[in-house]
């Protein structure tokens, strides 16, 4: 049975506004309940019914102020968290990060980006909010992650951030770490790689994730580390990374043999950048976030409330 717009409207009005059940509507019209159900769906598909889900308001101002005071941050954004790690939490963090970038970036800015699941969701959120175009240049802060999924890779993230703002970008055609320090030195002297690395010194804004060694972890799952190297890092007290630069819970950089093979910005280079935005959350990352904040690199933290409270408790 086909319904015209007038009938769809009446069925939808009785159901959504007058509170009639589908059975009551079916009886009054002499049709089946399944036909009423299909009509309600059709009314929604055709835009006669529009459903808006309004999120509750949460005020995390005090928590944001405490994070800024405790760790010397310029700004903090706290969103509603969840009991455990989830794709939804990562998406919400990505949306918060995208909104922060949208209000922060200006034409002429050089923007450095890292890799990972949170940055992937940030890019997806940028596509949803459709920021106004501005002339920015986006550059990768490190090389690629071996066999990691394409949408996690830093070059992909750099290109998609630039496209969201109608800006430009550079690719870094190199792995994040190579076999020997000599190989790294050779690659860093390559003019194409040098061109990207030179931009790190003039970057205005950096947006990055924080890697951790507690599952679920993109660093563990997609970072491309051999098991013996992961074990060695943990034994040395490493709790997390920023752009493949490792640190302990006190924020002290941990010098590992891997550090001499990494193609990417150093912690010292990141610290010199005016605005470093870290987007990270989930209680599994709390220890890594604490270490990252103690490094003195992060200027702006975007985090969920549960992880934020855990970080402050441990601090």
Image (cartoon, helix red, strand yellow):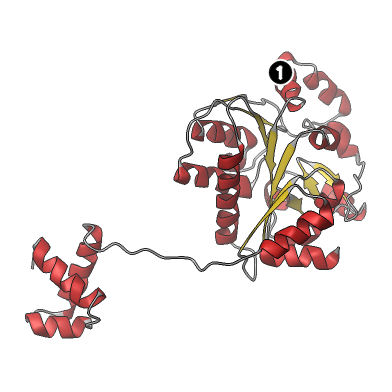
Query: Which residue is identified by label 1?
Result: 195
Residue 148, horizontal then vertical, whole percent: 64, 42
| Viewer-proximal residue among 205 and 290 | 205
Residue 12, horizontal then vertical, whole percent: 20, 71
Is disc 1 placed on a helix, strand or loop? helix
Residue 206 lies in what quarter of the image?
A: top right
Q: Report the residue at 13% width, 79% height from top.
A: 32
| Viewer-proximal residue among 79 and 161 | 79
Q: How crowded is mark 1: few (under 14 residues within 10 Å), some or many (20 or more)?
A: some
Q: In the image, 129: left or right of 301?
A: left
Q: Report the residue at 75% width, 35% height from top.
A: 274
241 is higher (above) or lower (below) than 290: above
Q: In the image, 174: left or right of 150?
A: right
Q: Report the residue at 53% width, 35% height from top.
A: 160
Residue 208, horizontal then vertical, whole percent: 69, 43
Residue 107, horizontal then vertical, whole percent: 58, 27
Res 276 seen here? yes
The quadrant of the picture occupied by the N terminus is bottom left
| Viewer-proximal residue among 45 and 172 | 45
Res 213 seen here? no
Q: In the image, 185: left or right of 148?
A: right
Q: Report the residue at 68% width, 51% height from top.
A: 218
35 is higher (above) or lower (below) than 123: below
């Amino acid at each position: 049975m086909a319904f015209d717009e007038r009938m769809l409207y009446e069925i939808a009005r009785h159901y959504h506004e007058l509170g009639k059940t589908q059975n009551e509507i079916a009886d009054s019209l002499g049709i089946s309940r399944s036909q009423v159900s299909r009509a309600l769906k059709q009314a929604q598909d055709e835009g006669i019914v529009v459903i808006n889900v309004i999120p509750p308001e949460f005020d995390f101002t005090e928590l944001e102020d405490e994070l800024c005071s405790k760790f010397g941050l310029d700004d903090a954004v706290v969103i509603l968290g969840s009991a455990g790690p989830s794709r939804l939490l990562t998406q919400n963090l990505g949306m918060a990060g995208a909104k922060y970038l949208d209000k922060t970036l200006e034409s002429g800015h050089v923007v450095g980006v890292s890799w990972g699941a949170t940055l992937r969701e940030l890019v997806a959120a940028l596509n949803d909010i459709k920021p106004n175009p501005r002339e920015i240049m986006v550059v990768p802060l490190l090389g690629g992650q071996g066999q990691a999924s394409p949408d996690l890779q830093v070059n992909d993230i750099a290109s998609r951030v630039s496209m969201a703002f109608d800006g430009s970008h550079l690719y870094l055609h190199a792995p994040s770490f190579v076999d020997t320090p000599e190989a790294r030195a050779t690659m860093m002297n390559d003019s194409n790689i040098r061109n990207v690395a030179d931009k790190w010194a003039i970057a205005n804004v950096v947006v990055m994730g924080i890697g951790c060694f507690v599952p679920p972890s993109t660093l563990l799952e997609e970072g491309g580390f051999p098991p013996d190297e992961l074990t060695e890092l943990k034994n040395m007290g490493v709790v997390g990374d920023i752009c493949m630069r490792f640190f302990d819970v006190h924020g002290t950089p941990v010098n590992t043999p891997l550090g001499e093979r990494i193609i990417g910005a150093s912690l010292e280079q990141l610290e010199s950048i005016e605005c470093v935005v870290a987007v990270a959350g989930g209680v599994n990352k709390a220890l890594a976030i604490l270490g990252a904040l103690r490094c003195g690199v992060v200027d702006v933290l975007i985090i969920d409330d549960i992880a934020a409270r855990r970080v402050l408790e441990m601090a």
